[in-house]
Amino acid sequence: MKYKRILLKLSGEALMGDKQHGIDSNRLEQYAQEIKKVRDMGLELAIVIGGGNIFRGVDGEKSGIDRVQGDYMGMLATVINAMALQSALEKHGMYTRLMSGLKMEQVCEPFIRRRAIRHLEKGRVVIFGAGIGNPYFTTDSTASLRAIEIEADVVLKGTRVDGVYTADPEKDPDAKKYSNVTFQEAYEKGLSIMDMTAFTLCMENDLPIIVFDMNKPGNLESIVEGKEVGTLIK
């Protein structure tokens, strides 16, 4: 395997599948199967999942909700998704631990870096919920920070698009895909990969990012095996 320890970032919107809101059980099952394949290969795996299918703090602010309050509501949404993913993974026989940036002992362990690393070393899939526990930070920032803290080899950002393009491929049919791009090139060209805080964290810590289509079966396994999938930013 090309990587020993990875952090997989999933968007909350991806869990909607064909629905307009909430969690699509078929999509959740698909993700669980994909994750099991790479876990059975001996990979150490941590996951950060967003909450946009339930609530987004930025959207809440537009409707009159205080930004800080909205961000905390968004953190709770990520915990709901994390619990759903945890249940799906355990149904497939994987050992998991859910760690939270907010204190909620009944359902999550508090995030402690050394404990998280120990869980990974013991072969458990670690899911990080509730962001970093502070407002004004996205789950992209959470993914970058947690990946650095657990000394992951790479951040895999699973999306519904198969990489980074010169423009939005869903809107511009002439958009061209990058197979490789440096952090500096991505910054200069204003490519939409992660928010600036998350992107800068990865750049300053030499942590590569791979943006790929998580909805295509086999993509996650191919990346772990070292095949060129999606777009590599390093």
Image: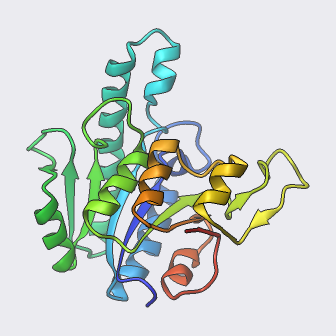
Q: Taking the image as drawn, is residue 105 in sight?
A: yes
**Residue 189 position in % (x across, y down):** 72, 50
Name the residue: 43% across, 66% down: 207
**Residue 95 position in % (x across, y down):** 21, 72
Left or right, 140 with reference to 211? left
- Quadrant (top left/top right/bottom left/bottom right) for the C terminus: bottom right
Name the residue: 12% across, 64% down: 114
Name the residue: 35% across, 83% down: 4
Question: Is 3 placed above or below 207 here?
Answer: below
Quadrant hosting residue 73: top left
Quadrant hosting residue 205: bottom left
Residue located farthest toward the left when viewing the structure as drawn: 105
Quadrant hosting residue 113: bottom left
Left or right, 31 with reference to 212? left
**Residue 206 position in % (x across, y down):** 44, 67
**Residue 211 position in % (x across, y down):** 59, 63
